Amino acid sequence: MEKTHLLEVRDLKVSFASKKTEVPAIQGISYYLDEGEVLGIVGESGSGKSVSSHCILKLLPENGKIQGGQILFEGKDLLPMNAKQIADIRGNKISMIFQDPMTSLDPLFTVGHQIEESLKKHTNLNKKQREERIIKLLDLVGINQPEKRMKQYPHEFSGGMRQRAMIAMALSLGPKLLIADEPTTALDVTIQAQIIELLKRLKDELHMAIIFITHDLGVVSDICDKIIVMYAGEIIESGKKRQIFYDSRHPYTEGLLNSVPKIEQSRQEKLVPIEGNPPDMQLLGSECPFSHRCGYAMNICARQKPPKLTVEEGHEVSCWKYYRERMESGE
Amino acid sequence: MEKEILLEVRHLKKYYQVKSGLFKKVNVKAVDDVSFYIRRGETLGLVGESGCGKTTLGRTILRLLEPTDGEILFEGKVINQADMKEYRKKMQIVFQDPYASLDPRKTVADIIGEALDIHQLYQDKAERKQKILRLMELVGLSDKFYNRYPHEFSGGQRQRIGIARALAVSPEFIVCDEPVSALDVSIQAQVINMLERLQKERGLTYLFIAHDLAVVKHISDRIGVLYLGHLVELADSEELYRNPLHPYTQMLLSAVPIADPDESEKRKRIKLEGEVPSPINPPSGCPFRTRCEQACDACKDRFPELQEISPGHWVACSQVQKQ
């Protein structure tokens, strides 16, 4: 019997309406996540990494349209649900934190008030109990003097503290899944390290699953169990953390790993950039989306999308080069 | 043999006045008594967290901001405001935000050509065009982009335009203010490699400002660490990484994410606590003492001077200096 995953995305397709045409943003992606797991979604701007997770809570902008697929949460498909049903899940079982803690908090209300909102909506706690819960939550995310801090406004918080407050808000109802969309990108490194430590600790204490969306491979290597690499709206490689970092098969993943400067490297070692720019999604046809920039591109890459192949358990890659290697080794 | 000193900064200060309360004004010391030098052909990296004064320092050196006090020397001569037009040909800047730093109403040719116009670096139109095309080629932009506008380009290509513009007057010294922070990683590497190539080909000297330690370490010969307007450590980049002496440098290094799971598990993290205090109301004495594990009473009293602990390795920490 097949196991029910906490979250399973099947063949999700999303497009955006532009003036003239429909531009595809996500071209049929599938992945799953179990309880207590941390999944990293890595990709460059425009790769669809944010859109793919915003769909889970139906947070697409107006011109965005889900064209097909399923998003199963605890076995139930979220896509056919109406606004009210989704609102029940949002914040309650699945919650989300964003990149910019400054713009995702309302400047007109105290931080305590904003955390209280979801408690009011989803629980039957009375005012005093809610207050106790808020204090507990702020304490959990490492905000000192929670009694005083909950009465303050967002502008009285620093960037790192705001992100902590956002996390407290997201955790207020004990979600099973936390979607973190570039939560540390706007923060300084020392604060980023603090937030990552916090998320790691919370994951263990609360046993929740996290989807961590980022462009920073360093952050992924620290916190994630599994990694998905996205390019032009497709998953081009996915696997456990070590499979991706030490045994990557896709030239793009390899390129990404080679193009980040590593602090332990000596100055003499040159960076190997990926030449060219990401493709225009409007112009993409049936080719492998990376074929324009790939150093190993063959004739077939420009004609046909590569099939998804399993390297070993949990490690999948879509690439003609790997396909040929497998053929040649006679498997 | 060591090369000559191209640029030197002596006791540079830049204070901003901000209102505090109704009538009171206080000074925010964005850059406070910073001194260093850069040799010809060298890259000096400056790192620090937001609000540490790294951008202000870069802009003050180019006199885009007027220093409150201190001297800036170029090729041994003190730079005065009156001679700035001459110096603009020798010192240029590349900005962080490739979207905001290009005039959206100008074509690429005019953006790059503007500096040529101002300094009258051509005889006739044909020479102007030829110079611009040569600059575009230098930064890897195809000549078909000559009459295009900035909005038609991606972030990486815009940064190339910004670099071509800086190179137009054939400067000797360029302040690179977070030139790759806004770019995707695969594009970052392209721009970094290009900056390195241009340095080699043209003997450029860089002041490379960034918050990303890995990037700074990659490109710099020496690195200075800024904290709340003070230079707290300055050393050879390899030395700074292997043997960081200032507790703040140690904290920064231990916070850098490592894109390698085994390494990142092996690493011992120092306790990262607290945040950068407000520069409006900085701690007395050593600015880092509020976050420092080794702080003692003496740190409250005065800011420790930058001292050379070993050849070329400077630290401003009274605890380190004692040992």
Image (spheres, coloured by chain):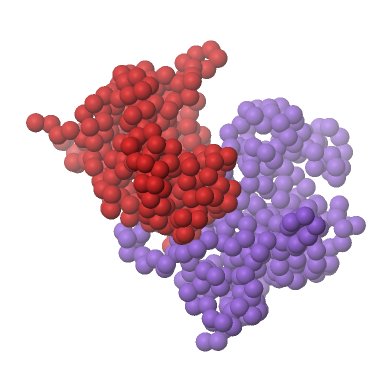
Rendered position, B37 above or below A162: below
Give x and y (percent) for residue B61.
75, 60
Rendered position, B78 above or below A46: below
Give x and y (percent) for residue A58.
39, 26
Q: Which image quarter holds the N terminus of chain B? A: bottom right
Residue drawn at point x = 24 percent, y = 36 percent: A6
Direction from residue B234 to residue A283 in the image, left or right: left
Rendered position, B295 above or below A80: below
Residue drawn at point x = 36 percent, y = 17 percent: A67
Residue drawn at point x = 50 percent, y = 54 percent: A149
Residue B60 in which image quadrant: bottom right
Give x and y (percent) for residue A119.
38, 39
Along the line of sight, the residue nearer the viewer: B120 or A99: A99
* Tint applied to chain B in the drawing: purple
Direction from residue A106 to residue B22 in the image, left or right: right
Residue drawn at point x = 49 percent, y = 78 percent: B294
Along the line of sight, the residue nearer the viewer: A290 or B197: A290
The residue lying furthest to the left in this view is: A1
Give x and y (percent) for residue B118.
85, 42
Direction from residue B48 to residue B254 in the image, left or right: left
Along the line of sight, the residue nearer the viewer: A156 or A13: A156
Residue B297 is at least partly visible in this image? yes
Residue B108 in which image quadrant: top right
* Tint applied to chain A in the drawing: red
The residue lying furthest to the top in this view is: A20
Rendered position, A68 above or below B225: above
Residue B235 is at least partly visible in this image? no
